[in-house]
Image (cartoon, helix red, strand yellow):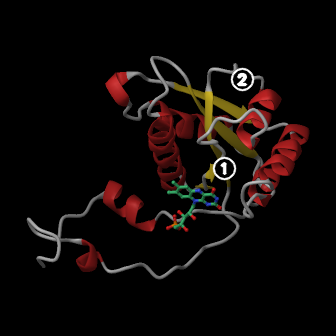
Amino acid sequence: MIDNEVLKAIRERKMVFKFKDEPLKEDQINAVLQAGYWSESFGNCEPWQFIVVDEKETKEKLYELTKRVTIYTAGIKNAPVTIAIAITGCGTSHYIEEGAVAAHNMALSAHSIGLGAYWLDVYDIENRKNSVEADAKRLLGLPEEMRLTYFLPLGIPDQRREQTIARLDDMIHYNKFGNA
Ligand SMILES: Cc1cc2nc3c(=O)[nH]c(=O)nc-3n(C[C@H](O)[C@H](O)[C@H](O)COP(=O)(O)O)c2cc1C
């Protein structure tokens, strides 16, 4: 079977929800930001804006806000850094995918350098004025036309999650669904 470091990192990455109370080094954060920056985008739009949140007070406020949309929010408060992934540029019709591609590259690269991360959905499909996305945008000073897609709490893992995974053979079909 073909194997290499990239495949190994993909296989071994798990979302991390609990972090050690230790600060990150600048070059660790930069490595993760680079991974977001090198992502693919629709029409090579390169639509990302990354807001690195490390102020305790802002993290607390984001934690309070995101409690409205998901239960696994504590990471925002506990992680030394949370990166907000915003989308702008030549059109925002693919904002969810473009945020997701960057979030995944960043989570994977975090794992590859011994850090942990998870993503937390914040976008509101209907882009409502009273949504968590809108409130978080105001808090972070993002312009109205931008979309805020995901938060990525990032830090040194304080857990190792195990999880059963579906069989790959059950997901593959040749030429027609159902053909094993
Ligand atoms: C598109 C996407 C959105 C996600 N959103 C959230 C979220 O809002 N909150 C959360 O706690 N985890 C979120 N996750 C993490 C998933 O729960 C996690 O990937 C899944 O349980 C599989 O675990 P693993 O990534 O460790 O293999 C998201 C993952 C993906 C791919």
Which residue position holds label 1?
Answer: 154
Who's the residue at 23% across and 78% down the image? 169
Q: Are marks 1 and 2 in contact (CB under 8 Å)?
A: no
Q: Which of these two is toward me, 152 or 91? A: 91
Residue placed under numbered mark 2 in the picture = 142
Q: In the figure, 40 relative to 46: above or below?
A: below
Placement of 42 over or under 166, stated as above or below: above
Q: Nearer the viewer, residue 80 or 125?
A: 125
Q: Quadrant of ligand 1?
A: bottom right
Q: Position of residue 99 (x, y in %)?
A: 51, 39
Q: Residue at x 55, y 22 (%)?
A: 88
How far is the residue under mark 1 from the one under mark 2? Answer: 21 Å
- What kind of residue is marked 1? Leu
**Label 1 or label 2, whichever comes before in sequence order:** 2
Asked if ligand 1 lies within 8 A of label 1, the reply is: no
Neighbours of disc 1 within 10 Å: few (<14), some (14-19), many (20+): many
Q: Amino acid at mark 2?
A: Leu
Q: Is residue 48 left or right of residue 142?
A: left
Q: Residue furthest left?
A: 175
Image x and y of residue 29, in percent: 62, 38
